[in-house]
Amino acid sequence: MPAKPPAVEIEVDNRVIRVSNPDRVYFPSTNSGKNAATKLDLVEYYLAVGPGIVNALYERPCMLHRFPKGLAGDKVHQKRIPGGAPPWLETVQLHFPRWNRTADELCVTELGSVIWAVQMSTVEFHPWNSRRDDTEKPDEWRIDLDPGPLCDFATVQRVAGVTHEVLDELGATGFPKTSGSKGLHVYVRIRPDHGFKDVRRAALAFARELERRAPQDVTTTWWRKDRDPAAVFPDYNQNARDHTLAAAYSVRGLPDARVSTPITWDEVPDLDPHDFTMFTVPQRFAQLGDLHREIDDHVFDIAPLLEWAERDEREGAEPPADPEED
């Protein structure tokens, strides 16, 4: 029986983290021209973009998408931190009304906790849009431009342009990124004055405005079976409680090791999401730094969006349906 590969110790600031099975293959095939990517490659990626991933996750409850056997095995969605976690790891306790249970979720405050999660086979990091000071009051409005099954990326790019236009008119600063899959995300820092229902209602009002301006490209139809499959759905439901998106700089569980990558608005018309992988983003990060580093300096009050929601409802629009909460 072949010998088990030795563990390695990784120094992260003032922590030493033991990484077991460093040679385990996580991404069997990539388009990088390199060999299959291993657990240690994933660790080295997150070290390279450390300030960016910590900024994206900082003090937010975080769900972990784990692949204990790599992409060839099953994916595990993990909310609760497992027993045996180091005593310095920070968590936040959340209550889930559906089952009247609580869970202690990872709450990143330093890069060491990210690397510990990768040691625990985490590939993707999915944070809440609220922070632990008040987990029921989001401070981030998330615009998820989700393409239908027959929607091409050019349509997503056009809708992103309209999104930028409307945000500018509102006086809101949007921070775009690739989703790491087929769509685009735009994040807006907001005042934590409202609960999830109000933020989601505001997000729906914004989505309806996109639909009015680009009816050929955008749909806000709730039921997937009724949507135009060639349109973009601005998924306002991603602002509901316990609904999460892959963080900026999170690797995605896709064969080419794609990354959800911050971009500039000027890049949107010509970008190809396939260009942003765990092999290419470190060099980009070294050159550009974290393109979302100033997001906390641009805080938007969603009051105008709530006025839009009230106007729409007066004119007969349905309020958003209540999603299931875990």
Image (cartoon, rainbow, N blue to C red):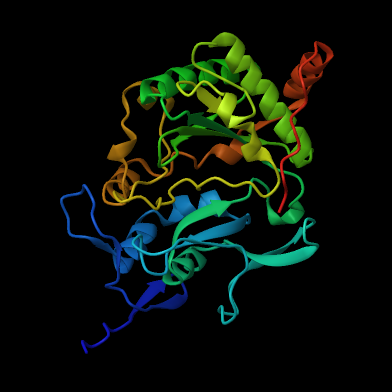
Which corner quadrant holds the C terminus?
bottom right
Q: Residue at x 56, y 78 (%)?
A: 85
Name, please, the residue furthest toward the right: 314
Q: Is residue 191 above or below residue 36?
A: above
Name, please, the residue furthest toward the front: 225
Across and down, in percent, residue 255 comes to: 30, 51
- Answer yes or no: is residue 5 visible: yes
Residue 19 is left or right of residue 87, and the answer is: left
Residue 267 is left or right of residue 250, and the answer is: left
Q: Residue at x 49, y 40 (%)?
A: 292
Which corner quadrant holds the N terminus?
bottom left
- Answer yes or no: is residue 173 visible: no
**Total count of labels:** 0
Name, please, the residue furthest toward the left: 33
Q: Residue at x 41, y 25 (%)?
A: 150
Across and down, in percent, residue 298 comes to: 61, 33
Across and down, in percent, residue 197 comes to: 77, 37
Q: Is residue 71 above or below residue 139?
A: below
Across and down, in percent, residue 215 comes to: 55, 11
